[in-house]
């Protein structure tokens, strides 16, 4: 059995592939391709997603102390349907931009699309940004999409069971209280 330290090391190695070393790059435009797979979701302990496959294109425009990163994420995520509890593939397409400024004294930015880093920094870890972009793209209600005829593609057997148990139960013990008037003058 793996120790906690070994598990953390493996997770860090998986997330290392989402780093860009920009220190040796001259001013110009660069493209980076990444693939987000199940190992990413396991390493980040992503509770909402069972699995997924997402292609990531990052266009980095670098100047002396400024970098503009344009992210394009396309693929699908395996989510559990809130209605029938079966898994389905949820398609995503995300476009985001991040502006990174190298400064002498890095500070927190109130703008989520602006990041300040130290002048001595050499790499940029994109894993947290990718995690956030995916998390924000998840729908609040996760249900199977409708088919071509506009019908739910949920498991019909489960929907029938839900309807069966959703009908109100007639309880004769409480019927006498329906006419009870609590109005006191």
Image (cartoon, rainbow, N blue to C red):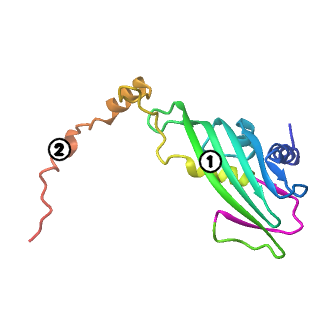
Q: Quadrant of the C terminus?
A: bottom left
Name the one closer to the observer, 95 or 16. Answer: 95
Classify residue 122 by image quadrant.
bottom right
Name the one closer to the observer, 38 or 162. Answer: 38
For mark 2, does the 10 Å Cα neighbourhood hold few (<14), some (14 to 19), or many (20 or more) residues? Answer: few
User: Is 118 in the magenta?
Assistant: yes
Distance, label 2 to label 1, CA atoms, is 50 Å
Q: Which residue is mark 2?
A: 175
Residue plotted at (46% across, 33% down) = 144
Residue 10, numbered label: none
* Residue 112 x, y percent position in the rendering: 64, 64
Q: Which residues are magenta?
A: 112-126
Residue plotted at (21% across, 45% down) = 174
* Residue 127 x, y percent position in the rendering: 74, 50
* Residue 8 x, y percent position in the rendering: 83, 48
Horizontally, residue 161 falls left or right of residue 22, namely left
Q: Which residue is mark 1?
A: 134
The correct choice, above or below, for 64 with respect to 158 in the image is below
Q: Which label lies toward us, 2 or 1?
A: 1
The correct choice, above or below, for 37 with respect to 149 in the image is below
């Amino acid at each position: 059995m793996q120790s906690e330290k070994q598990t953390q090391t493996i997770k860090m190695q998986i997330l290392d592939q989402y780093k860009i070393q920009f220190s040796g790059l001259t001013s110009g435009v660069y493209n980076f391709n990444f693939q987000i797979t199940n190992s990413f979701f396991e390493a980040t302990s992503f509770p909402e997603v069972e699995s997924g496959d997402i292609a990531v294109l990052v266009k980095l425009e670098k100047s002396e102390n400024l970098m503009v990163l344009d992210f394009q994420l396309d693929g699908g995520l395996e989510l559990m349907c809130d209605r029938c509890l079966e898994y389905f593939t949820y398609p995503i397409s995300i476009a985001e931009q991040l502006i990174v400024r190298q400064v002498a004294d890095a500070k927190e930015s109130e703008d989520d699309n602006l990041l300040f880093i130290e002048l001595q920094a050499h790499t940029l870890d994109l894993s947290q940004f990718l995690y956030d972009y995916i998390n924000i793209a998840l729908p609040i209600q996760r249900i199977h999409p409708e088919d071509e005829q506009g019908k739910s593609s949920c498991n019909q057997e489960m929907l029938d069971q839900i309807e069966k148990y959703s009908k109100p139960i007639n309880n004769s013990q409480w019927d006498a209280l329906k006419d009870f008037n609590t109005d006191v003058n």
